[in-house]
Image: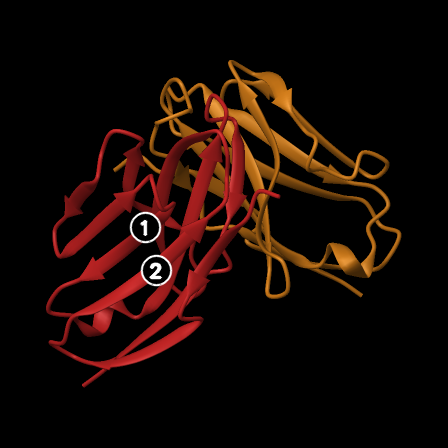
Amino acid sequence: DARVTQTPRHKVTEMGQEVTMRCQPILGHNTVFWYRQTMMQGLELLAYFRNRAPLDDSGMPKDRFSAEMPDATLATLKIQPSEPRDSAVYFCASGPTFFGNDTQYFGPGTRLTVL
Amino acid sequence: KNQVEQSPQSLIILEGKNCTLQCNYTVSPFSNLRWYKQDTGRGPVSLTIMTFSENTKSNGRYTATLDADTKQSSLHITASQLSDSASYICVVSAGTGNQFYFGTGTSLTVIP
């Protein structure tokens, strides 16, 4: 049963610390998305990749956030330095081909708390 | 302004009853509309994806409708079960499908 995996599942850190979240997309999927979800804002798209190349990261605060796909089996989202307002659940999702009408498969999320 | 609004914000129904959730959007140019189910503490799961030319799509007891003229969609749940308790999120894509606009979701609780 193929699924998207994310690590860590939970992360508590102090303001100013670096946070790295990892995602393993479903094998063979070539589109990867990073989302953030909060009670106040709901679901937001931060960035997405196609064939490991970043296509759009306009939803991401560039001064502190960075997203990369070092290889086809790993996507990372990094926050440096972290701030309390970054507290949220971060989801990774992957899609098989052209993402326009494709189903996106979400991981279980990383719950981040910044104190 | 591109927006997606869902109603009601929350809903409580008895097990076995039907219900309908609404999604109104002002997104343009429209590409597709997705309904997701999100259980507490889990990632969203895709229920349906509808393009401009589709006006109804079913996935088991879930049936989504789309009226592209009025820019409205609904998700109808038939014979609800306790496991249907979740948040239901409507997402509308614009352009070539690479711009996403999210509703804030409807929280559904099914009680025995």
The kind of residue on which mark 1 rests is Ser
The kind of residue on which mark 2 rests is Gln
Q: Which residue is mark 2?
A: B22
Name the residue located 48 percent from the left edge and 29 percent from the top edge.
Answer: B29
Name the residue located 36 percent from the left edge and 42 percent from the top edge.
Answer: B34
Q: CA distance from mark 1 to mark 2?
A: 6 Å
Q: Residues within 10 Å of mark 2 (few under 14, many from 20)?
A: some
Q: Colour of chain B?
A: red
Q: A58 left or right of A73?
A: right
Quadrant of the rendered image containing residue B20:
bottom left
Q: Quadrant of the N terminus of chain B?
A: top right
Residue B23: x and y, percent? 39, 55
Q: A93 left or right of A57?
A: left
Q: A73 left or right of A62?
A: left
Residue A62: x and y, percent? 80, 34
Q: Which mark is residue B73?
A: 1
Give the chain letter at badge 1: B
Do the residues under discs 1 and 2 have CB atoms within 8 angstroms? yes
Q: Is residue A99 above or below residue B87?
A: above
Q: Colour of chain A?
A: orange
Q: Secondary structure at mark 2?
A: strand
Give the chain letter at badge 2: B
Q: Residue furthest bottom?
A: B112
Q: Secondary structure at mark 1?
A: strand
State whether discs 1 and 2 lie on one chain: yes
Q: Residue furthest front?
A: B69
Q: Quadrant of the C terminus of chain B?
A: bottom left
Q: Is residue B21 above or below residue B16?
A: above
Q: Which mark is residue B94?
A: none
Residue B74: x and y, percent? 28, 55
Quadrant of the rendered image containing residue A21:
top right
